[in-house]
Image: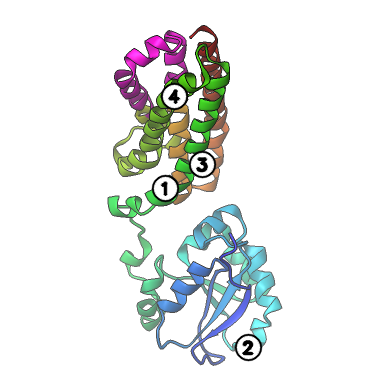
Amino acid sequence: MHYTVEPGLYALGNPSPKSPVLVTANYKMSFDRLRAALPQKDAWILVLDTKGINVWCAAGKGTFGTTELIQRAAKSSLNRIVSHRELILPQLSAPGIAAHEAKKLSGFKVVYGPIKAEDLAEFLNNGMRATPEMRVKTFTVLERMVLIPVELVGAIKAAIAVVFALAFLSGVLGPASFPRNALRYGHVALSALAIAVMAGAVLAPLLLPWLPGRAFSIKGLPLGILGALVLLSFHWSDFDALGGALHMIAWLLLVPSAATYLSMNFTGASTYTSLSGVKREMRFALPFQIGMGILGLAFWFSSLLVG
């Protein structure tokens, strides 16, 4: 979250008052990718303060917004530096920008460039005209795979912490000795959370177009249920020894809950979600996931007392 660039106006190459003004976020990768896409080009780069968030996410959150655009242009004295009155914004910034208001208050017309920075050179050479291909953002299997390692890092760290916590609690509260309880209950917990992570953070993005529903939490639910059934098939004898039906029901609730939560993390990476859609999904999904999680933990604790 500290991978940022100081907001303000930057010169790319040797720009003149007639050079184009490109607007981007102060997420350093966005800034660097923009510069790298325009070798030997002269331009001005106006960097907005998006709190270190990339263009697309910042537009959805409101930090890449009309007010920040107007204020940043004024603070940079842009109207005295360039002779024209046009700002080229990334197309994916459109959800956060009211172009008519920006022009009314700043005097600068908003022109939306291509989705990808790599198409900017061609866009500028063609008189700021975008081809139909420049306006389309794909979300192929390979593009979805790129997101998986980032999600896995966070999910695995959390899963390991939960496994150790559950193993410790089972060791203290379980019916047998501490080592025996921790090993038996911890072994099942490790398998369960590994399956949940696989379902929500790996299979959900890979199988995204073929999973039912539009909301990501709903798409992750059948994978979570399938994962819970796989867990039962592998640990049926263990469940019989660890509180029986109570322990089984606990993980039948916890695995889908975790899987749907992890699959919901991809709402901000999808090409067909909106800010209002994400908020609407979270309003119904989070209470459902939290409720399933609390109920599952209640069954899990109960299984310790009768195991």
Residue 213 visible here: no
Residue position for label 3:
277
Amino acid type indicated by mark 2: Ile
Residue position for label 1:
272
Disc 2, SS: helix
Q: Residue at 40% of width from left, 24% of height from top? A: 188
Contact flag, marks 1 and 2 (Cβ < 8 Å): no
Q: CA distance from mark 3 to mark 4?
A: 43 Å
Task: Residue 298 in the image: state x and y as whole percent.
Answer: 56, 16
Residue position for label 4:
183
Amino acid type indicated by mark 1: Tyr
Q: CA distance from mark 4 to mark 1?
A: 44 Å
Q: Residue furthest top?
A: 306
Left-right relation of 217 to 231: right
Task: Residue 297 in the image: state x and y as whole percent.
Answer: 54, 20
**Prevalent SS, magenta region:** helix
Q: CA distance from mark 3 to mark 2?
A: 40 Å
Above or below — where is 229 with respect to 240? below
Residue position for label 2:
81
Disc 1, SS: loop
